Image (cartoon, rainbow, N blue to C red):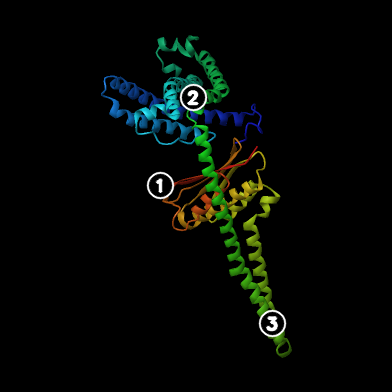
Amino acid sequence: MPTRDTAPAHRPLPRARACLDALEHLIGGVGTATLALLALVVLLFTAALCVIGVGVPAAPAVLRGLRAVADRERARLSRWGQEIISPEPVPARVREALRHPDIRRELRWVLVHPTLGLAVGLIGWTLPFNAVRDLTFPLWWHLLPPDEAAGAGLGLWDVDGLGDALWIALLGVGWIVLALAVLPGMARLQAWPGRRLLVPDPSADLALRVAELTATRAAALDAHAAELRRIERSLHDGTQNRLVGVTVLLGAARRALARDPSAADAMLERAQDAAEQALAELRGVVRSILPPVLADRSLSDALAGLAATCPVPCSIDADLPGRCAASVEATAYFVAAEALTNIAKHSGARRATVTVRRRDDRLHLEIIDDGHGGAGERGGSGLAGIRRRTEAHDGTFMLTSPTGGPTTLHVSLPCGS
């Protein structure tokens, strides 16, 4: 999906997608708001018991439950924007826990989110519901009793015929316009308490970030070393052996030229075939480093080329408003190529789909197949290499592959502005 910086807000398709994303965000927010409301009730009940000295032993467990609910909200918000890392575990002692700044922020959040998040989410739900109800009203208005038909359309119309029902359908169009205008803002408003109160302490966040960067730097070095080993094996085991064979055949042909010209001609033909095979393998190695179509044209074209050569029927859904950095596109191409190879070898799938989108300065790559599932990073499937290469670019890797399928691989890479 085009980003806000590259796609005008008045274009209908990006706006509709943003509205659907916002609606999904609001629905998730209602879920966490409901959990937060339950946590708030338990917290207040435990606080009341602590006044009489009975609830103190249960207080640490209640605070850990609050942390679990807050982590659900952190995970939800991380899927829709900048990642929010969970802070350090809740201290075992109640006094230490209540003095901890992260616990205090979570307590403020659990007071705000059940009211604001639940109210905004429920209001957001009503907009598409009202739109569907009023747009379809001409199809079923005659089934209503007369007293109910008189109060239709927010009580503004007394429906006596099809003409009045069509006016109510026009009101449904207004609901759609209103939803397109306000749902993204409502989603941001619902997420505001979590974005403000559930972020960890800056010093803790910095320490976690340093540790994460150290790990990704090590992963980048490992991925680079693995790539060099792969290229070396390809050149040594394939191309080099072919060229050695060419040298041997040319030497034999040279010696046989004076004795038996016909045998020399056959040897030269074999040497030519071996040289062509070596050249083809060398071109394959070069393309595996950086495909020419990726440098000359675009990531979408490179993925279309992959789909054309994949043994499993594969469709490409790529909506990219511009180019990303060459290293990011090369990583996305590697991920797609390795994933499609795994699908062809191990999944037993009949069809695969590759979806590429750019949202909020991140490139999202999702690969889905209808195979038997059960994929994992063990067993030499190549998924561990995909994870290392993704994390080397400070990206995220998620794999969902239940037994029986389908398998979904999602990779997110930062691609800059």
Q: Which of 347 and 63 is in front in this view?
A: 63
Q: Which secondary structure lies at badge 2?
A: helix
Instruction: Report which residue position mark 1 lands on.
Output: 402
- Kindly report which numbered mark, 1 or 2, lies closer to the viewer in this rendering: 2
Instruction: Report which residue position mark 2 lands on.
Output: 193
* Sequence-earlier tag: 3 or 1: 3
x%, y% of residue 345?
Answer: 49, 58
**Which amino acid type is shown beneath numbered disc 3?**
Gly
Residue drawn at the location 45% of the way across and 26% of the way down: 105
Left or right for 388, reference 43: right
Give neighbour class at mark 1: few <14, some 14-19, many 20+ (Cα, 10 Å).
Answer: few
Residue 14 drawn above or below residue 337? above
Residue that protrudes farthest toward the bottom in the picture: 259
Q: Quadrant of the N terminus?
A: top right
Q: Which secondary structure lies at badge 3?
A: helix
Q: Which of 88 and 151 is in front in this view?
A: 88
Location of residue 63 by image quarter? top left
* Sequence-earlier tag: 2 or 3: 2
Q: CA–CA distance between discs 2 and 3?
A: 78 Å
**Which amino acid type is shown beneath numbered disc 1?**
Pro
Left or right for 109, reference 264: left
Question: Are the two marked residues, 1 and 2, in contact with CB atoms closer than 8 angstroms?
Answer: no
- Kindly report which numbered mark, 3 or 1, lies closer to the viewer in this rendering: 3
x%, y% of residue 244?
Answer: 64, 75
- Kindly report which numbered mark, 2 or 3, lies closer to the viewer in this rendering: 2
* Sequence-earlier tag: 1 or 2: 2
Residue drawn at the location 59% of the way across and 55% of the way down: 224
x%, y% of residue 170?
Answer: 55, 18
Q: Tag on residue 251? A: 3
Location of residue 115 by image quarter? top left
Q: CA–CA distance between discs 1 and 2?
A: 34 Å
Q: Which secondary structure lies at badge 1?
A: loop
